[in-house]
Amino acid sequence: MSDLSNGLQQTVQAAYQSKTPLNIIGGNSKSWYGRTAVGSPLHVSDHSGIIHYQPSELMITARAGTPLTEIADTLDEHRQRLPFDPPHFGEHATIGGTVACNFSGPRRPYAGSCRDFMLGCRIINGKGEVMRFGGEVMKNVAGFDVTRLMAGSLGTLGLLLDISLKVLPHRLAEQTLTLDADFPAAIEIMNQWAATPLPVTAMAADGKRIYFRICGTPSAVEKSRQQINGDLFEDGWSFWKALREHTLAYFDDPRPLWRFSVPQAAAHIQTEAIDEQDWFIGWGGAQRWLRSDLPFDAIQKLAHNAGGTASLFRDKNSDKNRNENSDGSSHGNQEGEVFAPLAPALMQLHRRVKHAFDPANILNPGRMYREL
Amino acid sequence: MSTHRKKTPIDWQPFILEIAKLVSTDSLLTTPEALAPYECDGLSVYKQQPAMVVLPNTLEEAQAVLKHCHNKQVPVVARGAGTGLSGGAMPLENAVVLSLAKFNNVLNIDASNRTAVVQPGVRNLAISEAVKHLNFYYAPDPSSQIACTIGGNVAENSGGVHCLKYGLTVHNVMGIKFLNMQGELIELGGNVLDSPGYDLLALMHGSEGLLGIIVEVTVKLLPKPELAQVVLAAFDDVEKAGQAVADIIAAGIVPAGLEMMDRLAIKAAEAFAKAGYPAAEAILLCEVDGTEAGVHDHIQSVEKVMQAAGATEIRTSQNEAERLQFWAGRKAAFPAVGRLAPDYYCMDGTIPKAALPSVLKKIAQWSAEYQLPVANVFHAGDGNMHPLILYDANKPGELEQTEAFGKKILALCVEVGGSITGEHGVGVEKLDSMCVQFKQHELEQFFAVKHAFDPDKLLNPGKAIPTLHRCAELGRMHVHDGQLPHPELERF
């Protein structure tokens, strides 16, 4: 519960002077995400604590090292929540790490992503300058939207100090329903429901059935249940949490886990090289998980054909792969690229944006792309 | 950061001939009569006749024009419908105006993914009209939605009455294509919820034409709610109305819209639109939408909250016609206030909702001091206030007085933890106020971002981000609590 801004600023300033790469570490719950970190470890989780929370303003400001659990508990006392339902992936997950990864949970397609709820932030750029962007109000178009640029930038543009987020009230009632469907049918049905005004807040499919979550006032939920006419799934709460945290049985597998971001209604990806049971569809079709040993390029091709991209989300054998495949060129692992390649003009723009924030290339260098 | 660059004046005659070779004949405006409509945007107190306006017909033409401007180092000001309220599209003396008006086609409607791909010159409302048959709509609804275009909406990150629940433009756009100053096409996002790399899509929103020329936009479409109903509540005290806003949020309701008007705004709106508003110190309009069952439940809660907060009168729309009638007064508030005085100046600050009573009190006090009446219209749900200062531009010095008053209001917004602009942008209008909100390093960071996209400073230069020189000059005039802003800067 303390403000370590000054010390962190001094550290970054010194690193800038000596051109020493820094590896920013929060709760260390997501070190497996992105490319392998290099640089001298900079621990930031002690820069922690909720600075400002005003339930009637629907806004919370917290230091980046604040544990997600602390934020969730505080909001819960006032019957509010983080609308994007972030996964924790470990008990020490912080709000800073969540923003750096732009992680959102099952509610994402219907409520919005982590970046959507960012209102403002204070950061240290790669020159060691402390800067504030955005603010604590819902609407703010003064200056470029540096705040949202921070979301998902994996610490490569700035060290996050404080973050202001929009929060929302808890829903009054919630139910999870299921319908039997294989993947192609599930994609079709989920998109049909998404095109109606039903208060759906999560949809997923495991190849055998579709899971729908509906939220709202008790009578609205009851009406929607009748409309969907599915089977009531008693322990829906545990299911969505397990999906969010990747503790469902599906995720208990030694193979690399790939994340496909494709159009919600994109046809089910079927190929001989992939078993049906290795897919899991979330976000109403927009996010598709795949357990597979296929090479990086083959995976990208599948995603491209479906109208989207794929990333290596988590490779549990990363260390092993690193040894087997030292150049990291072909196999999906953290030493090679893990995110889909960018078009040349776009990559060039990325390099220039990186340079604008971190001219000495000291903030998490290479964590997102080899050259960023 | 260098702020002064030696510029040789452009020799327009040969330049116009060169551009004429790149576009079809109907795409070039150069006569004073043809240029007149382009001399300002929606903020008509700032005017500048451009030397030329180019309206390309195709992407290739736009690319060729940009490339040529880049070669000749001629700046470019992008323009949509010109409805912006901060001078963002106001021409510059030494620049080409690039109008995207002819890029006005809906390119694709993807019903199964609930998205539409449109050109930047498509009007905001035209998107909803184009997908009406599917029972979809495009959510952001700036009050100019009948005329403003989606390209301009992205450039300004436009809001509207319903953004408390449905978000701003940035929350409803999934992808864009834009041209850089060299005419290169760059694609961000698309028909997917997220894309790899930095969120440059978010960065482009609200960048006011400083980072690129938007040539295509993929928007998210939403299913129309089953039902929408509005509660209109009158209060004999602004503070009570403010409390009701906080109580509605505390009750766990996220209204689709939550608007407040003060006495002068109510009076003007009623005289103009005859919406049947009661005479009151403040009225709240609270719209709830969703499924029928959900709306019924929430409307009951809203009525109870309004009652408990001390509303003197509560009406709930019983049908669609009545709902629209309730909104008619609010939607006509600007033109209605326009009838109270020869001119009005619309401010656009945001504040934490809790600060509303104190901010309104201060505005009333200044209004008396400046002898300039103020009508207040307020997106209460998201803290975005629009004080409308009434003045007469024909009275010498009154515009200057109004601007000074306006800047004071914006500085107050920053002081209470808000922002100098919620949805209208900085443009040329709020450059001075930017110096109040941002410090030197932050402005330098903005220029570094600008440099990453546009190293030659050719895209809408001089707008949106004030030079450090300007802020230093301003600091000489504005001394707050004995503290000089930007003490680190040399004074000239």
Image: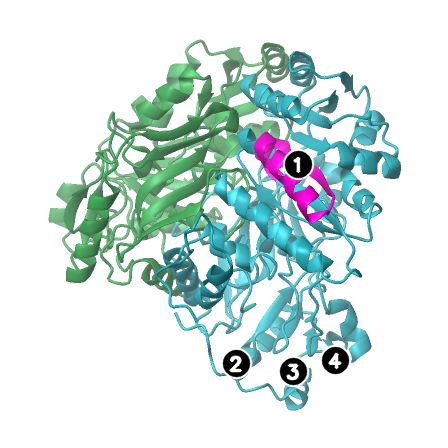
Chain colours: A green, B cyan
How many angstroms separate mark 1 from mark 2 (CA)?
Answer: 43 Å
Q: Nearer the viewer, mark 3 or mark 1?
A: 1
In the rendered image, the vertical position of residue A57 relative to residue B341, given as above or below? above
How many angstroms separate mark 2 from mark 3 (CA)?
Answer: 13 Å
Number of residue marks: 4
Q: Please report, as a chain letter, where disc 1 is located.
A: B
Q: Are marks 3 and 1 in contact (CB under 8 Å)?
A: no
Crowding near pointer 1: few (<14 within 10 Å), some, many (20+)? many
The residue at which mark 1 appears reads as B378
The residue at which mark 2 appears reads as B73
Looking at the image, is mark 1 or mark 2 earlier in the sequence? 2
Asked if badge 3 and badge 1 are on a common chain, one would say yes
Looking at the image, is mark 3 or mark 4 earlier in the sequence? 3
The residue at which mark 4 appears reads as B30
- Which amino acid type is shown beneath numbered disc 3? Ile
Crowding near pointer 4: few (<14 within 10 Å), some, many (20+)? some
The percent position of residue B119, horizontal first and vertical second, equals 65, 57
Which range is magenta?
B356-384
